[in-house]
Amino acid sequence: MSSAQDRPKHSAPSSVGGDNAPKTTTMDCKRARNTMQEALDQRLKAAELKGFQEHVLACQACRQDYGRLRSLRQWTRALPQEPVARDFSARLFARIRAGEGSPDAIFAAPIPALRQARVFLSGALTAAALLLGFWLLFDALGRRDATEGGGQLPEGYAMSEAGAPLGSSGLLRSSPTTPVMDPVQQGEILLDVVANDWQDLERYKSVQHPDPELLERIRTKATKIGERLGILQQLPVVPADPDLVEQLHRLNEAVGLLRLSPQAYFEIQMGGAPTREAPVGRIIIRLRPATDPQGEESPRFKPKVGLRAYPDPAGR
Amino acid sequence: MSSMSEIDPLLLSAYHRAIQDYAEPLQAFARRMLTEEPEYAEDVTQDAFLALYRHLHQVPEQAWRPWLYRVTRNLCLDRIRRWKHRPRAFRELADEEDRDPVAPDHYSLPPDQKVEAAEVQRDLEAAIADLPDKFREVFLLCEREGMSYEQVSSVLDIPLKTVSTRLYRARQRLLKALSKYLEEE
C-alpha cells in the first residue's frame, strides 16, 4: 500500500485528479484508507460504502491500494489445500472405537480471567459440597457415637470403603464433641481439580454413612456438581454460564451450612493459575479448629473471589 | 463416553458430513498454523474431530465449525509451545532433517505466468508463516476460511476490535512482503 506522503491529497469535498474526469468526493484519502479494510470485508454501512466507492472511483492511489487488498485476498483464497488422507475417517473411527479420549491440549489455551473465576467457582462449589458431605457424615457419626456412650470415634472410622484415608492428614478422625482437631491433626485437603482426581473424589463419596437418605442426598449433589465440573473441564469452550448466580448461591449455601457448625472452622482458598497439568487451577481447603490451642477465637472466614459469607451464627 | 451405537444416527450422520466438509480446510488451517511442524496437521485435525465426537451431545450442531476451529487452534498452539520449549539441539537437528534439499532461493523458474503464480503462492505461504501466531490465526480464519469478524471473535475469544486490528496488521505485513508482485499490478 502506498504511503500517505507519496499520493495526492483528496480532501472532502475536492476536485481530484488521477482519472481523466475530475470528480468531487465526500471522503478524503485518509478516511478512505481507514475504511478500506471494512469495505473489503463488507462491514461498511450503505452511506459509508457509497462514499468509499465514490472516492475509490475518483482516486487512483486509493483504487490501487484497494486493488492490492483484493489481490491479497484472491491469492490467499487460491492457496492450495491438500486433501485429507483417504483413510482419515477410517483411522478416526478406529481411534473412537478404541476409546481414545479427547486430547488434553484442548485446554492449553490461556483461560480468560472471567472464565477462570467461573471454573474456580465450580471447583470451589464441588469442594464445599464435599466438605459439607464430610461434615454431615462427621456430625451424624459423632452423634451416634455419643448416643452409644463412646466419646471417641472408632479407630479407622474415617476410612473410605476402599480403605484409603480421607484427606491428607486423617482429619476426620477427630471427634466432633471434643475440640475438633489439634494442630497436628488440623488438616488440609489439597485438591488439584483435574479429571483424574475426580476419581479420588468419587471414592470420598463412598464413605459408609449411617443415614442412607442423607448419604444419597450428598451423593446426588456431589454427582451433579461433579458432572458440571466434568463438562467444564472437558469443553475447550466453557459455555456462557447462565446459572453462574445460582452456582454462587449454592456455593454460599454450602459454605453457609459449613459455617453453622460450631465445632469447626472452614476456610476455602482458591489460588494458583491454571496450568496444563491442572487446567482449572488448584483448590485448597483448610480445616481449623473453632478455637486454637490457646482458646482464642479463629479469625473470621474471609472468602475470596467475591463470595459472600453467611452471617456467622456464633457471632464470631 | 458414548459408544457409537448409543449415538443418535442422525447426529452420527451429521458428524460424518462434518468430517467431509471440514476436515480438509481444518487440516489446511492446522498446517499453516504449525509452521515448524506442518507434518502434525493431520494428527491435530484428527484430535479435533475426536474431541468433537466426545462432545457431540454438548456442542450444538450449528456450532461445530467454530468449535472445531477453536479446538484445532488450541491444539496447534499447544504444539507450537512444545516446539518452542524443545531443547535447541533437538530443534536444529529436526530442522536439518526437514530441510528441503533445494532451497527455495535456488529454484530456477522460467518467467511464464504459471510459474509466477506458483512463486506468489510460495512467497505468500512463507509470508503467512512469518506472521506472529496471533496475526496468522486471525488472517487465516478471515481471509482463507471466510469467517466473519463475529465468528473469528467467538473462535478466538477476542473482542471484535482486536480481530479488526490484528487483521489489519497481518494484511499490512503481507502486502509489504509481497510488494514486488503488487507493484507490477
Image (cartoon, coloured by chain):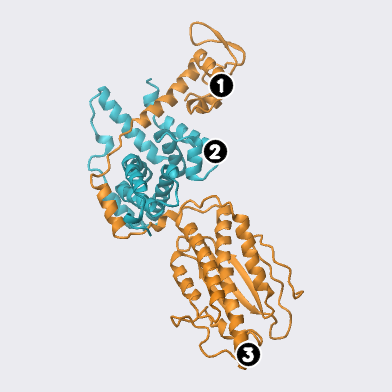
The residue identified by callout 2 is B160
Look at the image and tell me whether residue B77 can be seen.
Answer: yes
Q: Secondary structure at mark 2?
A: helix
Chain identifier for the orange-coloured part of the image: A
Q: CA distance from mark 2 to mark 3?
A: 65 Å
Q: Please state which of residues B129 and A189 is positioned toward the viewer in this rendering.
A: A189
Q: Nearer the viewer, mark 1 or mark 2?
A: 1
Q: Residue at x 25, y 22 (%)?
A: B112
* Chain of the residue that carries numbered disc 3 in the rendered image: A
Chain B: give its colour.
cyan
Residue type (three-letter) at the residue carrying disc 1: Ala
Q: Residue furthest top?
A: A21
Q: Classify mark 3: residues with Cα within 10 Å, few (<14), some (14-19) or many (20+).
A: few
Q: Nearer the viewer, mark 2 or mark 3?
A: 3
Q: Residue at x 53, y 72 (%)?
A: A216
The residue identified by callout 3 is A147
Q: Secondary structure at mark 1?
A: helix
Q: Secondary structure at mark 3?
A: helix
Q: Position of residue A59 (x, y in %)?
A: 51, 15
Q: Please state which of residues A30 and B9 is positioned toward the viewer in this rendering.
A: B9
Q: CA distance from mark 1 to mark 2?
A: 20 Å
Q: Residue furthest right?
A: A315
Q: Please identify the quarter of the rendering in which residue A82 is found.
A: top left
Per the rendering, the mark at residue B173 is none
The residue identified by callout 1 is A46
* Chain of the residue that carries numbered disc 1 in the rendered image: A
Residue type (three-letter) at the residue carrying disc 3: Thr
